[in-house]
């Protein structure tokens, strides 16, 4: 089993459930090392003191907060832990809410909460109670040096904990300069709704592999085998068409995959992956910046 990154207790009311925190997601992005182009040697990062111009061992490094330019206040791990000792060892459930009330913009990283063997009954009780009520829990706890707001929810037979952004960390939409646009024509809106229906399908995450990662790994394997790679030809820029034409072409592509001549209303059910992706490709046409729509 994976190594726990945190241990403590999950509390709700007077119930205390000893738990351990495990990573729920393993990122599989392609990672490159930095090399010296001349000889291919690995670039190494070292911690240097800017005042003494020498490397500093890790045990001599402390944490500092900049209060003014080049002026820092140092804070130790012990001082941080003393701020709220309970928070460093307890995931305290504050409220139970509807999951639909939490916008995905608030979610950060997800972990699993696994109980100690002696707490299996209390853990199962909380999982079943949350599942039957349809609620998720909002909780707080300290992970590393930050008090995290988190969402605890049932996931199969376990509890998942997702750390969350705070309200003051969310950039409001009102701060954006979203260009104003005229209300869409009813015909365009109907076609857009039909296109949404034709591209609708159950969420099956395995149908969305990381194609780019697979291509990069294939490139690396070919180069490692000594194969000479020719750069692909540049793609032709998308032909600029009107929004109505783009919608019409997208619907036509979706209908061809759903059955020749199928009426729009018959494409409202779940579409298969090939049909959906082909229709999406047909929709990749844009307006030229500053250009006018064609009637």
Image: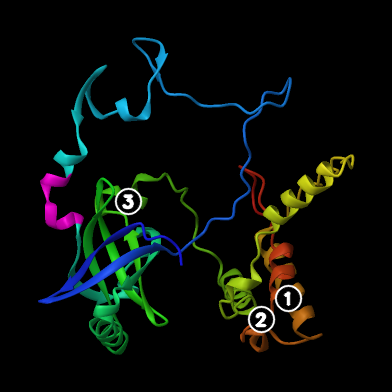
Please tell me which of labels 3 and 2 falls first in the chain. Answer: 3
Asked if one can make out residue 285 in the rendered structure from this viewpoint, the answer is no
Magenta stretch in the rendered image: 81-88
Q: Is residue 222 above or below residue 203?
A: above
Chosen colour scheme: rainbow
Whole-angstrom CA distance, mark 2 to mark 1, is: 7 Å
Foreground residue among 51 and 280? 51
Q: Which residue is mark 2?
A: 271
- The x and y percentages for residue 226 are 88, 40
Q: Which mark is residue 246?
A: none
Residue 121 to residue 13: above or below = below
> Residue 279: x and y, percent?
71, 70
Quadrant the C terminus occupies: bottom right
Does the CB distance between marks 2 and 1 fall below 8 Å? Answer: yes
Mark 2 surroundings: few (<14), some (14-19) or many (≥20) residues within 10 A:
some
- Dot label at residue 170: 3
> Quick one: 249 or 32, which is closer to the camera?
32
Residue at 66% x, 50% y is 287
Q: Left or right of 233: which side holds 61?
A: left
- Residue under circle 1? 275
- Within the magenta stretch, is there residue 86? yes
């Amino acid at each position: 089993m994976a190594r726990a990154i945190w241990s403590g207790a999950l509390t709700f009311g007077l119930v205390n459930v000893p738990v351990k925190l495990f990573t729920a997601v393993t990122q599989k992005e392609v990672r490159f090392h930095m090399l010296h182009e001349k000889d291919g040697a690995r670039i190494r990062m070292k911690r240097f003191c800017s005042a003494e111009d020498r490397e500093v061992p890790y045990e001599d490094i402390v944490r500092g907060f900049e209060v003014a330019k080049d002026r820092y206040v140092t804070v130790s791990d012990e001082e941080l832990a003393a701020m709220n000792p309970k928070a460093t060892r307890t995931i305290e459930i504050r409220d139970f809410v509807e999951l639909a009330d939490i916008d995905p913009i608030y979610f950060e990283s997800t972990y699993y909460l696994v109980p100690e063997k002696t707490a299996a009954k209390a853990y199962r009780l909380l999982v079943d109670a949350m599942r039957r009520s349809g609620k998720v829990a909002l909780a707080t706890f300290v992970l590393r040096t930050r008090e995290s707001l988190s969402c605890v929810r049932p996931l199969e037979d376990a509890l998942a904990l997702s750390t969350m952004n705070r309200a003051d960390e969310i950039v409001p939409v009102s701060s954006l300069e979203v260009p104003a646009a005229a209300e869409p024509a009813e015909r365009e809106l109907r076609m857009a709704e039909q296109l949404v229906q034709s591209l609708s399908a159950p969420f099956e995450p395995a149908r969305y592999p990381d194609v780019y990662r697979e291509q990069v790994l294939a490139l690396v394997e070919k180069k490692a085998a000594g194969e000479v790679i020719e750069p692909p030809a540049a793609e032709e820029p998308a032909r600029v068409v009107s929004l109505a034409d783009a919608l019409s072409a997208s619907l036509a592509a979706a209908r061809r995959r759903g059955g020749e001549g199928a009426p729009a209303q018959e494409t409202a059910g779940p579409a298969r992956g090939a049909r959906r992706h082909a229709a999406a490709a047909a929709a990749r046409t844009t307006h030229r910046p500053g250009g006018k729509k064609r009637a």
